[in-house]
Amino acid sequence: MGKFKIGTVGWVILHLIAIGLVLLAGHYIKF
Amino acid sequence: MTQKRNIRTTLVFGLFFISLGGFLLHLRIHSPSAHPLNYIPFFIGLVNIVIIPWMFFFRPLINWAYILNGMSVIVGIILMSDFSLGKLPPELSLSAIFLNTTLADIMVLAGKFTVGKALFDLEFSQMDKDLPVRSKFLRYPNLGWWLVHLVAIAVVYAIGTELL
């Protein structure tokens, strides 16, 4: 699968950013 | 040219054409000049046409291409589902679900995801056709991992919609 490691800290930061962005998207996007 | 390179080029062009088709459909229905929200599919579409397919040509970038491709599919599925759920006809029938929702567009996205997965597997699978597939379903890069992310992102998106 090749080298693909982001580490535990990277994983947590990535998920926090993603959760924040998706929450904001849910809040602001209104169809 | 090797067999692998030939298959990879074919699949990359498959991805390119599916993305271009989706992009042009979006452009016809939701022009960016009509509403600022339409810039979301516009730019995601451009990335899907111009950047992601070509990333699959380079082995160090394939993990990122696979993730970007899959995540853009998840974003598309969730946003188009939300769009459809807000406009469901009062009397819901099977034909209404098939013909009057964004189900068709979501199926196109599912095709795009599977082409990306085929490209990923082409690079990292053993090419002996008789080898069994050994994998943990819920772990990256397998399908279960994607399903978990689809559900999780949909739940977080719904929380953002309903609670914030």
Image: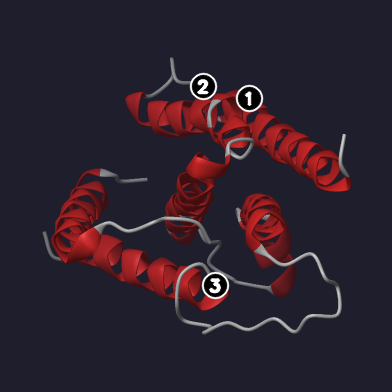
User: Would you say the residues marked 2 and 1 are in contact, meaning their CB atoms lie under 8 Å apart?
Assistant: yes
State which quadrant residue B111 falls in: bottom right
Relative to the observer, which residue lies in front, B64 or B91? B64
Give the mark, 3 or 2, whose residue is nearer the N terminus: 2
Relative to the observer, which residue lies in front, B97 or B41? B41
Q: Residue B107 at x, y = what percent?
A: 68, 57
State which quadrant residue A19 falls in: bottom left
User: Would you say the residues marked 1 and 3 are in contact, meaning their CB atoms lie under 8 Å apart?
Assistant: no
* Label 1: which secondary element: helix
Q: Which residue is the site of mark 3? A: B142
Q: Which residue is the site of mark 2? A: B31
Q: Residue B112 at x, y = what percent?
A: 66, 50
Q: Which residue is the site of mark 1? A: B28
User: Quick one: label 1, few (<14), some, or many (20+) residues within 10 Å?
Assistant: few
Q: Is residue B97 left or right of residue B138?
A: right
Q: CA distance from mark 2 to mark 1?
A: 6 Å
